[in-house]
Image (cartoon, helix red, strand yellow):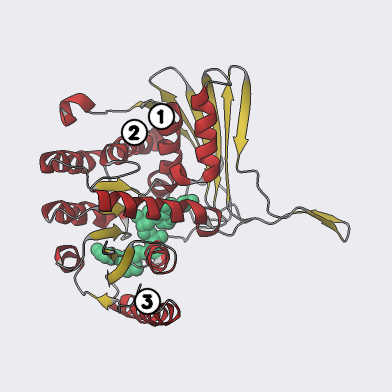
Amino acid sequence: MTDLRVGVVGVGVMGADHAERVVRKTSGARLVAVADADAGRAEALAGRLSERSASTARHSGGTTHAETVRVVEDPMDLIAADDVDAVILASPGFAHAEQLFACLEHGKPVLCEKPLTMDAASALRVVEAEHKLGRQVIQVGFMRRFDPEYAALKQLLDSGDLGRTLLLHNVHRNKSAPPTFRSEMIVRDSMVHEVDVARWLFGEEITRITVHTPTPTSLVGDGVLDPQLAVFELANGAMADVEVFVNFQVGYEVRCEAVAERGSATIGLGSGVFTRAGEQWGGTMPADFRVRFEQAYDIEVQRWVDATVRGEIDGPSAWDGYAAAAVCEAGLESLSTGKPVDVALADRSEVLG
Ligand SMILES: NC(=O)C1=CN([C@@H]2O[C@H](COP(=O)(O)OP(=O)(O)OC[C@H]3O[C@@H](n4cnc5c(N)ncnc54)[C@H](O)[C@@H]3O)[C@@H](O)[C@H]2O)C=CC1
Ligand SMILES: O=C1[C@@H](O)[C@H](O)[C@@H](O)[C@H](O)[C@H]1O
């Protein structure tokens, strides 16, 4: 069986992490090309990973990861390239729609980082274009579904042992975000994870969202509404709340507590090695998502590679990306009015037949 030849578009924080993951940790796949709007960044990463590939190959007898990683100037050329079987899209959200359409045009399987696109209308066009293609080639990077703790929580709730799930309480805190990270991005780039988590854990669509904005932290620029507190209402009457606070200062903290009829279950309490020393007690916190969700990203990419080779996807679909975009769009309206906003979601059976 030949390796899946992967190209990565956008090699900033997340794309570089995924590229390295393909080279170092993923079996059955080979990184062949990278592209970035910043050519220097792509060159630097390709150089570093080619060196690493060469050394991996030497140590493994030269059978795997032996090729150099080439830089393709134009992301569209990478997507079209004959020697790229599948694409990881880690460019900024605003570039996703155009690049996803290119993947569909060339029939290339794609693991697209969240958000699928910037708004519900373009996300729906992506879903429709994929449906027209006649096979699922788009998987969305909602990696929490692959995190062992989230997966165990899902299994527990689905088992029915705790009775019906009634509520979710979520906390999503980043140590800090750049000044360019505006209030809307807190909804579209950060809260979108809880949107997916709530839809996935309940197996229901979100029908209404309210985004509350408490007094913002004084540690961010003018006008940035951080933290935010949102309430999601689901089609079955269940509810979920989430605090998103992207300038928490302390570290990365993601928690989820599910409240069911006969019990509750909480994940995300892990604090590494809990120590008592020097009149202090406590553990450590991850600095960012790459540390906290490393295993989830690893499993996500490995399962995406395995499924792609089978001609399938194995994770959140374009529909999931679209549904999340529709919720975030309603969330952005609520962010500006403070009022509950109904989610306008297309009829799934009408769109997908
Ligand atoms: N699943 C997760 O936990 C995370 C997902 N993300 C997602 O990953 C994507 C990338 O985010 P980051 O890596 O944090 O951003 P970043 O800003 O660190 O990297 C983006 C890279 O894309 C390049 N770029 C800009 N326009 C481009 C274009 N049109 N075509 C190709 N490359 C282009 C930039 O030069 C930069 O190198 C976003 O969709 C983001 O939401 C980011 C962080 C965590
Ligand atoms: O997706 C991610 C980032 O884009 C976002 O900016 C962070 O808030 C999230 O914690 C991270 O998982």
Q: Could you tell me how many numbered marks the image carries?
A: 3
Q: Which residue is mark 2?
A: 330
Q: Position of residue 83 (x, y in %)?
A: 18, 68
Residue positioned 39% across, 55% down in the render: 302
Q: CA distance from mark 1 to mark 3?
A: 40 Å
Q: Position of residue 78 (x, y in %)?
A: 19, 67
Which type of secondary structure does the marked residue at label 1 adopt?
strand
Q: Is 282 situated above or below 353?
A: below
Q: Which residue is mark 3?
A: 45
Q: CA distance from mark 2 to mark 3?
A: 38 Å
Q: Earlier in the sequence, mark 1 or mark 2?
A: 1
Are circles 1 and 2 on residues that touch, CB within 8 Å? Answer: yes
Q: Position of residue 233 (x, y in %)?
A: 43, 24
- Horizontally, residue 312 falls left or right of residue 284, namely left
The label number, if any, that marks residue 209 in the structure image:
1
One can see residue 343 in this view: yes
Give amino acid for label 1: Ile
Give amino acid for label 3: Leu
One can see residue 35 in this view: no
**In the rendered image, which quarter is residue 130 located in?**
top left
Q: Earlier in the sequence, mark 2 or mark 3?
A: 3
Residue positioned 34% across, 33% down in the render: 330
Q: Is 319 situated above or below 160?
A: below
**In the rendered image, which quarter is residue 181 located in?**
bottom left
Q: Nearer the viewer, residue 228 or 261?
A: 261
Quadrant where the N terminus is found in the figure: bottom left
Give amino acid for label 2: Ala
Q: Is mark 3 within 8 Å of ligand 1?
A: no
